Image: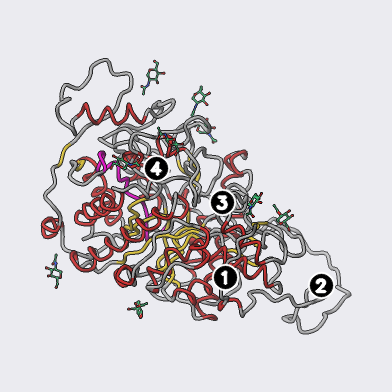
């Protein structure tokens, strides 16, 4: 028996998104006025090895003369939250032969050690190079010489609008290391890959190496540095009323201050997948089992999660809002949402944090959150079912957050039909949540080609939505990589994506015109296929990544100037190769990292990207 859903209205489907115009090869060359002569005259001349090369150096950030502030300092904000107790815990040593003697203290050293013993991170070892903060050294000028430019490149004549934010982005668990040091508690990231992919607790040692990392970015002229704070560093016991880790507070103060000292702007994400393990209660298996909506169960559905997140956010904001330009509450929450309650908690926690920032802190910076979706494009735009499938795919991933937050509108039908335990939003909820983000922030890595599960059949999408055994859940479409003529253009896997700049322009139009807010490209990046297997010099000469960044920026400029889409910034993922949730094989970095020495090297794409932006008036 098939459940028949009422037909959903399709207002956004009146316009097809792609038009195929027939044309003959070769491509015409309208810039060449006539065919030109076909008989050259040949001559002998004296030969010499003369060649002229312009040697360019990356321009570093200037030492700042003034530093912007966005809120009063901690002393003026501390009364906005309950009074906190601050403490320190040190480092977990699983081989320790002595044990803490403060067992009576629910948050003492014994309790903190017990958290780690309970988390039981597999194969916990320390092969770190650093155990204390590394003092930065200036970047030698010979590291800043630009590589030979690609012969072909964008030919646009547009500039970026004044104030366009150009930056790089990162997340704590993927770069920090020092995972059981200076009081940090265990998070999902410390247990996620138990019984499968080998884990790593060192990553890029950025926790101790951050000054050199920031120094390297400043030397390349990068202005905006986006990073995430580890919740389990600030609050190893996660919950409201538990003590704050003084060493973590000091650490992130130091990071922010060093970013500012280098003439850069700090931007902070509060939760980038590293959920404290407390939200799995006494059953850590939950963290390792399949989520109903996303790929991983991020614990957001836990009954204590919402209040605990808001408490953590308030502690972070009262300490750092004076200096932080943008706060991103959640990173890609769909991917770690387990069920309908997860999404309910995320959007309500986000809205509460926004109201706190704007109405109690009176912050003048921006608040947003980062969404993900490898833009679904209809395989055959003249096929109604493909169009419907693409819209279903996109609205399912973005609408549960974007509808209430940007429009004060209910969840999309695609979401409500699929996730039967969704939490209905009341008119009061919608009024409170509406307008609680300053920008629509998106991580538009690539595009996906979408068809209905059964070709040409809208009903197959609706059947899937109601059928918990359908293999197409939760997206309920067939995600493919081949366009209608069989060319492979779309997303294949994390290590193997395609460069789809023209779809980016369509995507920016889709986002802006649907949710009507300025856009931030919060992450975008490209894993050159097989880069991890190459030698260092070949890794550094990463032409495909240059093509990716320059073509994406060129299409962004067209969206801005030709389509009237407001795009406020773009952040490269990531400033260096890092731990990609299991291994280091997917290189997304614009710098290499030597896994033995932790030495960083700039890749070609970093120079090309910065040079492109600078040439177009970006500070
Ligand atoms: C604990 O001891 C084992 C055996 O000596 C060693 O292999 C491991 O690296 C040690 N772990 C830590 C975190 O020091
Ligand atoms: C732990 O180490 C063993 C031995 O090296 C290895 O076989 C296993 O895959 C590792 N497990 C994880 C989760 O890293
Ligand atoms: C939810 O989190 C709390 C800790 O705040 C924990 O005590 C409880 O067991 C968790 N609930 C579930 C269902 O895991
Ligand atoms: C722990 O969680 C897993 C995954 O959700 C579940 O299958 C299992 O029944 C749970 N165990 C207990 C004791 O509740
Ligand atoms: C923020 O503004 C409100 C309303 O004007 C005011 O009551 C409050 O004291 C201000 N907060 C701070 C931290 O200055
Ligand atoms: C959401 O807020 C915007 C901006 O204040 C407003 O124009 C819009 O009408 C609100 N939406 C709803 C459904 O109330
Ligand atoms: C649900 O999907 C499963 C797997 O494709 C299929 O066997 C079953 O017939 C479907 N149920 C309904 C009611 O369509
Ligand atoms: C999805 O579409 C592709 C391309 O049309 C097709 O080859 C594939 O069989 C479809 N997948 C399924 C599971 O139907
Ligand atoms: C990392 O550095 C070590 C020591 O300098 C060197 O032997 C090794 O080849 C480097 N690894 C790569 C991948 O370049």
Task: Find numbered disc 3 in the image and state the secondary structure of the residue it sits on.
Answer: loop
Q: Quadrant of ligand 6?
A: bottom left
Task: Find the residue positioned furthest to the front.
Answer: 1
Q: Are marks 2 and 4 in contact (CB under 8 Å)?
A: no
| Tag 4–tag 3 contact (CB < 8 Å) | no
Residue at the spot x=50%, y=62% of the render?
Answer: 415
Q: Which of marks 1 and 3 is nearer the N terminus?
A: 1
Q: Is residue 205 left or right of residue 296?
A: left
Task: Give the spatial CA distance, label 2 vs label 4.
Answer: 49 Å
Q: Residue at x 21, y 26 (%)?
A: 110
Look at the picture and state if 215 lies above or below 4. Answer: above
Label 1 secondary element:
loop
Q: What stretch is highlighted in magenta?
A: 218-238
Q: Tag on residue 6?
A: 1
Front position among marks 1 and 4: 1
The residue wearing badge 4 is: 173
Say which label, 3 or 2, has the lower sequence index.
2
**Would you say 269 lies left or right of 467 here?**
left
Q: Earlier in the sequence, mark 4 or mark 3?
A: 4
Q: Which circle's residue, 2 or 4, is located before the other in the chain?
A: 2
User: Does residue 122 sit above or below 99 in this rendering?
Assistant: below
Provide the residue designation for mark 3. 468
The answer to whether the beta carbon of the residue marked 3 is less than 8 Å from any atom of ligand 7 is yes
């Amino acid at each position: 028996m098939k459940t028949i859903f009422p037909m959903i209205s399709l207002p956004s489907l009146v316009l097809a998104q792609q038009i195929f115009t027939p044309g003959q090869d070769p491509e015409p060359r309208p810039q060449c006025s006539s065919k030109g002569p076909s008989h050259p005259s040949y001559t002998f001349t004296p030969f010499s090895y003369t060649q002229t090369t312009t040697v360019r150096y990356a321009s570093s950030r200037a030492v700042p003369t003034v530093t912007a502030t966005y809120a009063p300092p901690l002393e003026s904000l501390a009364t906005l939250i309950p009074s906190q107790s601050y403490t320190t815990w040190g480092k977990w040593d699983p081989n320790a032969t002595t044990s803490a003697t403060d067992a009576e203290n629910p948050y003492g050293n014994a309790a903190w050690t017990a958290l780690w013993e309970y988390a039981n991170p597999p194969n916990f070892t320390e092969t770190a190079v650093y155990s204390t903060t590394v003092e930065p050294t200036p970047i030698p000028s010979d590291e800043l010489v630009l590589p030979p430019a690609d012969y072909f490149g964008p030919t646009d004549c547009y500039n970026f609008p004044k104030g366009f934010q150009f930056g790089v982005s990162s997340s704590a668990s993927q770069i920090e290391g020092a995972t059981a040091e200076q009081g940090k508690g265990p998070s999902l990231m410390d247990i996620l890959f138990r019984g499968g992919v080998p884990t790593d607790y060192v990553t890029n040692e950025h926790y101790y190496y951050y000054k050199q990392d920031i120094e390297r970015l400043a030397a390349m002229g990068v202005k905006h540095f986006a990073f995430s704070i580890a919740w389990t560093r600030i609050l190893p016991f996660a919950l409201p009323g538990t003590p704050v880790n003084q060493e973590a507070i000091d650490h992130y103060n130091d990071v922010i201050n060093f970013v500012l000292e280098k003439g850069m702007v700090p931007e902070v994400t509060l939760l980038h997948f590293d959920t404290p393990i407390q939200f799995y209660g006494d059953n850590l298996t939950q963290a390792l089992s399949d989520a109903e909506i996303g790929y991983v169960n991020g614990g957001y559905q836990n009954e204590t999660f919402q209040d605990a997140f808001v408490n953590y956010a308030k502690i972070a904001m009262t300490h750092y809002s004076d200096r932080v330009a943008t706060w991103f509450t959640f990173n890609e929450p769909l991917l770690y949402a387990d069920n309908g309650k997860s999404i309910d908690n995320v959007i309500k926690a986000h809205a509460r944090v926004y109201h706190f920032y704007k109405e109690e802190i009176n912050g003048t910076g921006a608040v947003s959150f980062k969404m993900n979706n490898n833009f679904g494009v209809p395989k055959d735009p003249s096929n109604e079912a493909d169009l419907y499938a693409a819209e279903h795919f996109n609205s399912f991933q973005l609408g549960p957050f974007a509808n209430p937050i940007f429009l004060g509108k209910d969840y999309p039908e695609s979401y409500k039909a699929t996730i039967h335990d969704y939490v209905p939003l009341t008119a009061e909820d919608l009024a409170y949540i509406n307008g609680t983000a300053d920008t629509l922030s998106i991580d538009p890595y690539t595009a996906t080609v979408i068809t209905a599960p059964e070709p040409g059949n809208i009903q197959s999408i609706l059947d899937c939505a109601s059928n918990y055994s359908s293999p197409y859940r939760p997206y309920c479409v067939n995600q493919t990589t081949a366009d209608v003529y069989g060319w492979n253009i779309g997303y294949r896997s994390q290590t193997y994506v395609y460069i789809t700049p023209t779809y980016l322009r369509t995507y920016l139009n889709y986002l802006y015109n649907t949710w009507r807010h300025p856009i931030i490209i919060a992450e975008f990046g490209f894993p050159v296929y097989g880069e991890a297997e190459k030698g260092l010099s070949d890794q550094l000469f990463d032409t495909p990544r240059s093509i990716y960044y320059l073509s994406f920026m060129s299409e962004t400029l067209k969206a801005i100037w030709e389509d009237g889409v407001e795009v406020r910034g773009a952040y490269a993922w990531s400033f260096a190769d890092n731990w990609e949730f299991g291994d280091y094989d997917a290189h997304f970095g614009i710098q290499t990292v030597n896994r033995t020495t932790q030495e960083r090297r700039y890749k070609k794409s970093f120079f090309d990207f910065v040079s492109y932006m600078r040439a177009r008036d970006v500070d």
